[in-house]
Amino acid sequence: MRPSILLVVAACLRIHGTHRPEAAPSPAPPSVAEGAAIVTRAQCGRCHGGGAGLAVQPAPRQKSCAGCHAWIHDTRDDATEREIQAEIYPKWDQYVAHVKSYLAVPDLGAAGARLDPAWMSAFLRDPVKVRPGFAETMIRTPLSAAEADAVAAFLHAAARPLAGVAAQAAALPVSARAEDLAEGERLYGKLQCARCHAFGARVAAPGVPDAPDLALARRRMRPADIAAFIADPTAFGGGGQQRMPSYGLGARDAARLRDFLVSAPLTPAPAPVATALPPVLERRVTWQEVNERVFGAICSHCHSDGKMTGGDGGPGNTGGLGYAGAGVDLGSYRGILRGALRPGGRRVSLLVAGPGEDEPPLLARLRRRVHEHDAELAGRALAAAGAPGAGPGMPLGQPPLDDERLQLVRTWLAQGAPGPGGRDHASRAGIRRLARASRAIQED
């Protein structure tokens, strides 16, 4: 339940209830300094900079997720550079083939200045799909509500006073007058906003799919800031990252376009639908196939042994992005057999269901991502998607595995997760052998 709803409920109880408790003291405002410390601890600089007056330094390339992705992506058409890097990183061609995400990430200073802090706090804990054309989303963070509030306060603290036409547009109140809304809709069509933006059920034109969905504007930004941003997209900072064009609108027209965006009826988002697992294949699935299609292509990026990256095995292994290291290495069969590290140093299998578990933890995390993605697409809280449980779904911040890949993983696990030698573990005895092998390597 959102804080605003809680306040309304509490007020109703005080007015209508038979018991009138003493008013609780107001919570202390989130500390900007605390938010800055959390941003550093959560390694937000691995993807984001804070060029608009915010003290968030981008990580060096070898520690930067976005920077490393851009580096890899930039070599795709340079055969000489790819050959050079392949001498150092034998899987470079594999990286080039699969790295397509986090190539355009927002400046935290500019985003924090224009986004509503309450929305930012909720978004950090429960991301929704903002840009329909992007495969990736903001990662699901492990922040508490209080920590997310503090981060939002820190990000918003760098907001500078509006000036000029942006300030004039921000000062105009939202209008419900029919003529203002009609003029706003006319401007929406004249400026061809739909060429870059989806607007709820309205579909963005092909070829430019990466702008934010305007249906979320009324939730992400306060009305005054929407008008200011339309009037002057540079008013909140962002420098060279700013891709929203300036149309030279006056304050009144900017406000009218804002009025249309925040008032136009929207088609309700569909409710998340429970997704059934694809059936187990009848054919054999080998380690080589599941590794090439899934683990090597998607998972090992954040779950590796770190030997080729200076000891950084990714958020899922040595830790990062606010997560403690889980010691999961999906870069090799032996690494997978080592399982995951639990608090206290105990290791558990990823491939065999433990006590009280209905399925292997690896499959459970992949399924959980399906539910998270449903919630993101529908703009709903994760709880509404029916996916309770600790820990984020996998792959983190990426689309869930499609049915074909999920079917491969499920079949491979059902067949006893055979290794490179292809030993058949499908029988009950084979599953027990797999569990013993996993335990032996965990204890190694």
Image: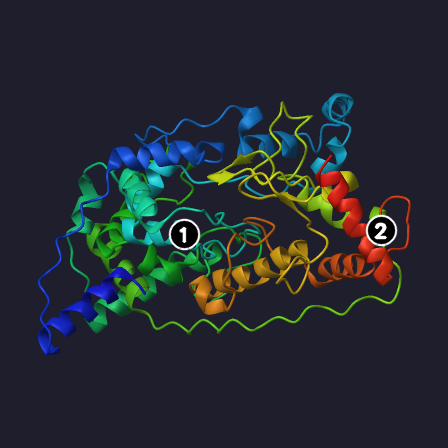
**Residue shown at 76% from the left, 34% from the top:** 93
Looking at the rendered image, the quarter that the C terminus falls into is top right
In the rendered view, does 281 fall on the left or right side of 248? right
Front residue (pair 120, 135): 120
- Position in image of residue 351 (x %, y %): 72, 53
Question: CA–CA distance between discs 2 and 1?
Answer: 37 Å
**Residue shown at 79% from the left, 48% from the top:** 436
Front residue (pair 399, 333): 333
Q: Amino acid at mark 1?
A: Arg
- Position in image of residue 249 (x %, y %): 27, 50
- Position in image of residue 27 (x %, y %): 18, 50
Name the mark on residue 418: 2
Please tell me which of labels 2 and 1 falls first in the chain. Answer: 1
Name the mark on residue 387: none
**Residue shown at 73% from the left, 49% from the top:** 294
Q: Residue 263's quadrant in the figure?
A: bottom left
Front residue (pair 360, 438): 438
How many other residues sit within 10 Å of disc 2, few (<14), some (14-19) or many (≥20)?
A: many
In the rendered view, does 297 fall on the left or right side of 316? right
Determine whether label 2 and label 1 are within 8 Å by CB.
no
In the rendered view, does 332 fall on the left or right side of 419? left
**Residue shown at 45% from the left, 33% from the top:** 43
Q: For mark 2, give the secondary structure.
A: loop
Q: Residue 17's quadrant in the figure?
A: bottom left
Q: Amino acid at mark 2?
A: Pro
Q: For mark 1, give the secondary structure.
A: helix
How many other residues sit within 10 Å of disc 1, few (<14), some (14-19) or many (≥20)?
A: many
Nearer the observer: mark 2 or 1; the answer is 2
State the residue position of label 1: 125
